[in-house]
Image (cartoon, helix red, strand yellow):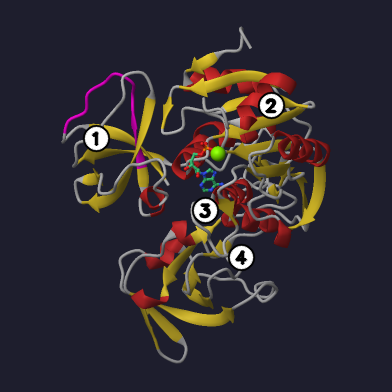
């Protein structure tokens, strides 16, 4: 692999991998199944939102001019609690209508006063303040019928799914979930629940990676974990390539003799890059196995997690033209000394404290790349640029976990 790009910057790794796309189809789902899916087409509203002028408050509707110089006392001529009841009502001078939040505004009225600022007897209301014109929610003020409200590529959060319903859609077109094979490698790995023998550890990467895949709206396919055997690995890769759109392996991509993922990819696959200027997480490779894109992730649990967030997540988003979900980024003030590296983008796990002066980042936990607790107990990762020095008190960029 003489010309294979080696030990590339993160941006270069992204650029190289983005040249490889995958086919992702479209399917129609019910709104109840739309959570964390990616909208496949622009979605336009089938109605105006709101569909009619309505009250933003429980209170009274009347003519604004009748409310100037409060207190003012007006005659109550009716109650509007739901659509239809306003048809027979016309609010004339000196009159008011009791109205509930969301109920249609009757003809004649052009202002609302909330019930808290009124007092009533049997047939009249006394207003303590002027009526508020902005408490009338105008027809179409949020969305106009036909307007494209959600674009193709939108990641469907709960509020966006609600918006689909507001727009009148019962079903929506979403990107078909990518099937993402996850293959753990290593003779030392045991499934949680089994008894550990000497030298063995519980296999954890596939569970963390499966969660990350689901979070992006796709379907993890956990393959059985393979020992350090080229034949097993080849068979499992072949199965994965037939059945899945993307393959993730963990372990076996470093320089060691038993790093069989790297070896089999060099000998029988197509490697597009190997090793990245990223800490933790420098060993990964990307390429094709039988035309199926494959990321070889490091075995160390923190490294595999970081590489997913920094390389695999962006690749999946790019391949499916999805604009989310992305980790929130923020700036925080360093409260601990953190160690950058000379040539790599370095991510240190930190606790984030919210103070009145902004976010403060503390590095509280042992940063070993085998220490999964360092991510599990942290709220963020500070992003340290290669070759720079950082002091306590500096503002640094953080990826919120
Ligand atoms: P490797 O990249 O295969 O050399 O593995 C590096 C380290 O990560 C070793 O300590 C492995 O035991 C550990 N490791 C590899 N795969 C997994 C996994 N799926 N779950 C947990 N730890 C792993
Ligand atoms: Mg290994």
Do tag 1 and tag 3 residues touch (Cβ < 8 Å)?
Answer: no
Residue 71: in magenta span:
no
Q: Is mark 2 within 8 Å of ligand 2?
A: no
Spatial separation of the CA atoms under disc 4 and disc 3? 77 Å
- Label 2 sits on residue: 264
Q: Which mark is residue 262?
A: none
Q: Nearer the viewer, mark 2 or mark 4?
A: 2
In what element is the residue under mark 3? loop
Can you tell which of label 4 and label 3 is closer to the viewer? 3
Q: What residue is at 56 percent from the left and 28 percent from the top?
A: 257
Which residue is rendered at x = 41% and y = 34% of the image?
280
Position of 378 with respect to 210 (left or right) is left
Mark in front: 1 vs 3: 3
Q: Residue drawn at (46%, 66%), measured in percent from left and top?
A: 112
**Residue marked by disc 4:** 107
Please state the extent of the stretch shown in magenta in the rendering: 381-391
Residue 274: quarter of image: top right
Q: Which of the two labelled residues, at mark 1 and mark 2, occupies the earlier sequence position? A: 2
Front-most of residues 149 and 145: 149
N-term-proximal mark, 2 vs 4: 4
Tell me if residue 97 comes above or below residue 349 in the rendering.
below
Q: Check the image and name the residue furthest to the top.
A: 3
SS at mark 4?
loop
Residue 287 seen in the current view:
no
Q: Is residue 197 left or right of residue 143?
A: left
Residue extending farthest to the left is 392
Residue 78, compared with residue 162, is above or below; it is: below
- The residue at which mark 1 appears reads as 338
Is 370 situated above or below 276?
below
Give the labeled residue for mark 3.
200
């Amino acid at each position: 692999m003489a010309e294979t790009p080696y030990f590339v910057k993160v941006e270069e790794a992204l650029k190289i991998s983005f040249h490889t796309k995958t086919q992702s189809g479209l399917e129609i789902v019910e709104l109840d199944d739309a959570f964390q899916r990616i909208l496949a087409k622009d979605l336009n509203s089938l109605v105006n939102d709101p569909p009619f002028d309505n009250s933003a408050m429980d209170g009274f509707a009347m003519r604004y001019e009748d409310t100037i110089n409060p207190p003012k006392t007006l005659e109550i001529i009716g109650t509007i609690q739901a659509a239809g009841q306003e048809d027979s009502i016309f609010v004339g001078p000196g009159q008011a209508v009791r109205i509930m939040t969301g109920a249609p505004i009757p003809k004649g009225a052009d202002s609302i006063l909330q019930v808290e600022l009124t007092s009533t007897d049997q047939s009249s209301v006394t207003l303590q303040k002027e009526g508020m014109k902005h408490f009338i929610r105008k027809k179409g003020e949020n969305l106009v019928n036909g307007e494209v409200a959600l674009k193709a590529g939108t990641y469907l959060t709960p509020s966006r799914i609600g918006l689909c319903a507001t727009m009148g859609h019962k079903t929506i077109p979403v990107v078909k979930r990518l099937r993402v094979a996850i293959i753990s490698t290593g003779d030392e790995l045991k499934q949680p629940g089994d008894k550990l023998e000497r030298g063995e550890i519980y296999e954890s990467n596939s569970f963390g990676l499966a969660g990350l895949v689901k979070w992006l709206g796709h379907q993890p396919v956990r393959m059985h974990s393979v020992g350090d055997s080229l034949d097993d690995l080849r068979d499992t890769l072949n199965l994965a390539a037939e059945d899945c759109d993307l393959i993730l392996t963990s372990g076996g991509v470093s320089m060691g003799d038993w790093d069989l993922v790297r070896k089999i990819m060099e000998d029988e696959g197509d490697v597009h890059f190997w090793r990245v200027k990223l800490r933790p997480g420098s060993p990964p490779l990307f390429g094709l196995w039988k035309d199926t894109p494959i990321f070889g992730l490091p075995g160390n649990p923190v490294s595999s997690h970081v590489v997913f967030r920094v390389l695999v997540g962006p690749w999946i988003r790019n391949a499916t033209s999805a604009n989310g979900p992305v980790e929130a980024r923020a700036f925080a003030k360093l409260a601990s000394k953190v160690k950058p590296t000379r040539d790599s983008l370095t991510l240190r796990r930190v606790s984030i404290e919210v103070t009145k002066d902004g976010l403060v980042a503390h590095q509280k936990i042992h940063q070993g790349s085998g220490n999964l607790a360092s991510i599990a107990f942290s709220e963020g990762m500070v992003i340290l640029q290669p070759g720079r020095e950082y002091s306590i008190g500096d503002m640094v960029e953080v990826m919120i976990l």
